[in-house]
Amino acid sequence: MQLGMIGLGRMGANMVRRLIRNGHKCVVFDRSAKVVSQLVEEKAVGAASLADLVKKLEKPRAVWLMVPAAVVDETIVGLLPQLDAGDVLIDGGNSYYVDDIRRAKELAPKRIHYVDVGTSGGVWGLERGYCMMIGGEKDGVKRLDPIFSTLAPGVGGIPRTPGREKPDGTSALGYLHCGPSGAGHLPRPRPCAIPSIISTTSICPTLRRCGGAAV
């Protein structure tokens, strides 16, 4: 699958690397041209601007924002003139869930899907994977499943709970569609993304599987 990634900090860049290593195609942009060049050497497609990134993506597009919460709205404003109905915008940073709900409503008349993803994994995510709590419309989220399944840790070698040996949906793999817009960033301890390992009322097992660092 093809994905556009905006924001190539330590997590964003490593997410791109994990996707490329597993056969996905990534178009990347960052304010630092040096970081873009580094990923181009690793088989990503570089973009010189937001408009250039959108131009290089096939329709319907999927664009992941891995930028600070304070600049998400600014980035969306810069992207909107180039986006079309059916495109998906994903915010994988630390946005406030109320802002996610507002953005989804603002984008709905343009028929642009907005998906918020609470992403954990830190610098260890490249090898261990990223646990993700996802909010958004079902259709938009389902389309991104190849991306989520590649980024997620997977079942791994940890012994499963007796009686739950078979994976029960995507939660066993390390990612979960939690509900409508805002659900991925709700201000609560993240429920366990892998209920076969820890109780579903506990904090996400990123501490054990991804190193304990969130974006």
Image (cartoon, helix red, strand yellow):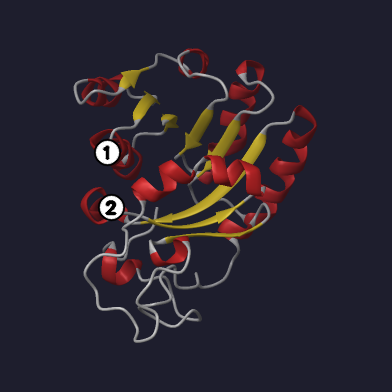
Q: Quadrant of residue 155?
A: bottom left
Q: Determine contact: label 1, label 2, CB under 8 Å.
A: no
On residue 61, which mark appears?
none
Left or right: residue 39 versus residue 96 is left
| Residue found 35% across the figure and 78% down from its top | 197
Residue 87 position within the rendered picture, expressed as x and y whole percent measured from the top left: 61, 28
| Residue found 34% across the figure and 77% down from its top | 165
How many numbered circles does the render carry? 2
> Relative to 62, does residue 181 appear above or below in the rendering?
below
Left or right: residue 72 versus residue 27 is right
> Relative to 86, does residue 66 appear above or below in the rendering?
below
Q: What is the secondary structure assignment of the residue under circle 2?
A: helix
1 or 2: tag closer to the N-terminus: 1
Residue 209 position within the rendered picture, expressed as x and y whole percent measured from the top left: 27, 66
Instruction: Name the residue tied to disc 2.
Output: 125
On residue 22, which mark appears?
1
User: Which of the image's four quarters has the N terminus?
Assistant: top left
Q: What is the secondary structure assignment of the residue under circle 1?
A: loop
Mark 1 residue crowding within 10 angstroms, few (<14) / some (14–19) / many (20+): few
Q: Quadrant of residue 35?
A: top left
Amino acid bearing label 1: Asn
